[in-house]
Image (cartoon, grey):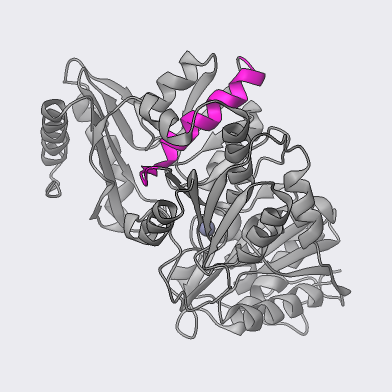
Amino acid sequence: MTDTADTTGHNFDPTILREYDIRGIVGKTLSAEDARAIGRAFGTLVRRKGGKSVAVGYDGRLSSPMLEAALVEGLSASGVDVRRIGMGPTPMLYFAVYHLHTDGGIMLTGSHNPPDYNGFKMMLGHDPFFGDDIQRLGALSASGDFESGTGAVSRHDIVQEYADRMMRDYREGKQLKIVWDSGNGAGGPLVNEICMRLPSSHVLLNVEVDGTFPNHHPDPTVPENLEQLMEAVAEHKADLGIALDGDGDRIGVIDGQGRILWGDQLMIVLARAVLAERPGATIIADVKASQSLYDEIARAGGVPLMWRTGHSLIKTKMKEVKAPLAGEMSGHIFYADHYYGFDDALYAAIRLIEILSNGDQSLAEMRDTLPEMVNTPELRFPCAEERKFKVAGEVKEWLKGQSGVEVNDVDGVRVKTADGWWLLRASNTQDVLVARCEAKDEAGLARLKQALGDALRAVGMEPPSF
Ligand SMILES: [Zn+2]
C-alpha cells in the first residue's frame, strides 16, 4: 500500500549522498530528520522488492545512538520489521543480514572519519547498496512516495554467534604473541571475544570504545596511526600487530620487526594460502595494488584480476567471478572462502594468524620474501567535479601516440612500461585525482613520474609535486 497522504518529501544535503555510502557532518549536513527519512525511504525500497525486515547496527560514535533511534523509527514507519543488533563493527551488521535472514541491513557508521562525522552503509538483500541505488533513495525521499505501516522492532545480541562463526573453521597451531589495536573503534568488544577464543598470547590496546578517539585516529592506512602499535610490538617482542579502523572493516598489519605490511603485501600472504587449497582460483585486487601482487597470485597458481577501487565494486565483482578472496590497498579484505564475501578485518586477522600459527615462517620472514619495489604514496590532487572523470579518458587518447606502454582502463588509466607502472584515476568520493607510480628501482621511478607529469600536461593539467 502506498500512502502519500500523511507524508511529505524530505530533501538531503546533496553532499551526503555519496558513491558508497551516505555520510555527513552531524548537526551541519546530517540530522536525526535525515536518518528518519533514510529509514523510511530504505524501508520503502525493501518492501517494494517484497522484503519484510532490516537489520540495524551502529558504531561507537557519540552521535550514533541518536541517529540509530531515528533510523529505526523511519524503517518501522515504512512497515518493515527492524532487528537491532546494537553497537558493533560494520561486518557484524553484514553478518546479521545472513544470520538473522533479513532482507537488508543498515550500519550507522562514520568509519575512519573525524568524530563529528557519521553515516550509513547499506545492504539490500545480500548485495551492497551503492552508486545509483543511493541516488534513487535520495529521489524517493524527496518525492515523499513512501510505504506506510508499523514494523515490529526487536533487539538481538549476536556478538557471541558472530565471534563463534569467525572462529568456526580455525585450525589451531602453535601459539603466537599478538598485539591488537582497536583504535577505540567499534571493533574493540569483538577483539576481546576473539582473544578469548584464540589460543595465543594477546596484548590489547585501545579496546574501550570511545567515539572521541583519544589515542589516535582509527585509520590504519596512515603510518602515524600505527606508531603506538609498532611500539607495543617491539616492547612485547610480539610476532605481529593488528590494527582495525573505526568500524572494523579495514585492517592494518605490522610484522614482528615493526614494519607495515601494506594491503597488497598482506594480500600476497593471504592469497598464497587460499591458492594452496584452491588452485586456479581468481583473486581480485584493486588498481592501486602493486604489480608484484598480481605476479605472485599467478606464480602461486591463481588467476589475478585487477578491478576498480571501492569496497562495493569489489564485492559485486567477487560474486560475479566467484573469487574466494579479494583485497584493496586501503585494507578492505574480503573472504568468500569459508565465509560470506564481505570485508571483515577481524576475520582477515584470524585467517592471517591461522597461516602463521600453522606455518614455519614468521610474518617478518614472509615479508622478506616479497619483491622490493619503490613507489610513491598515493598522490591526491584537486580536480573540478565536472572534469575529474574526463581526464583519464583524455590521457588514454593521448597515450595512443606513445610506444612501449600497455594501458589498462578498468578504473582510470593504469599504464605499464618497462620500468613499472603508473596510475591515474578519479576518486569516487572526493573531487580529486589519484595517482601512484611503482618501479623496480629509483631511476625507473623517476622516469615513471616524468611520464605521468607529461601525460597530465598533455591534457592541460598541472602535475602535483612529487
Ligand atoms: Zn571502515
Where is residue 93? Give x, y as percent: 70, 59
Label total for image = 0
Q: Nearer the viewer, residue 52 or 66?
A: 66
Where is residue 375? Give x, y as percent: 24, 36
- 300 above or below 81? above
- 139 above or below 394? below
- 123 above or below 372? below
Identified at 44% across, 41% down, the residue is: 263
Identified at 68% across, 63% down, the residue is: 106
Segment colored magenta: 257-279
Residue 50 visible in the current orientation: no
Q: Nearer the viewer, residue 371 or 310?
A: 371
Q: Nearer the viewer, residue 329 or 401?
A: 329
Where is residue 137? Give x, y as percent: 62, 63
Where is residue 245? Give x, y as percent: 50, 59
Residue 333 relative to residue 292: left or right: right
Specify whether residue 261 is painted magenta: yes
Q: Quadrant of the N terminus?
A: bottom right
Residue 386 relative to residue 234: left or right: left
Identified at 54% across, 13% down, the residue is: 301
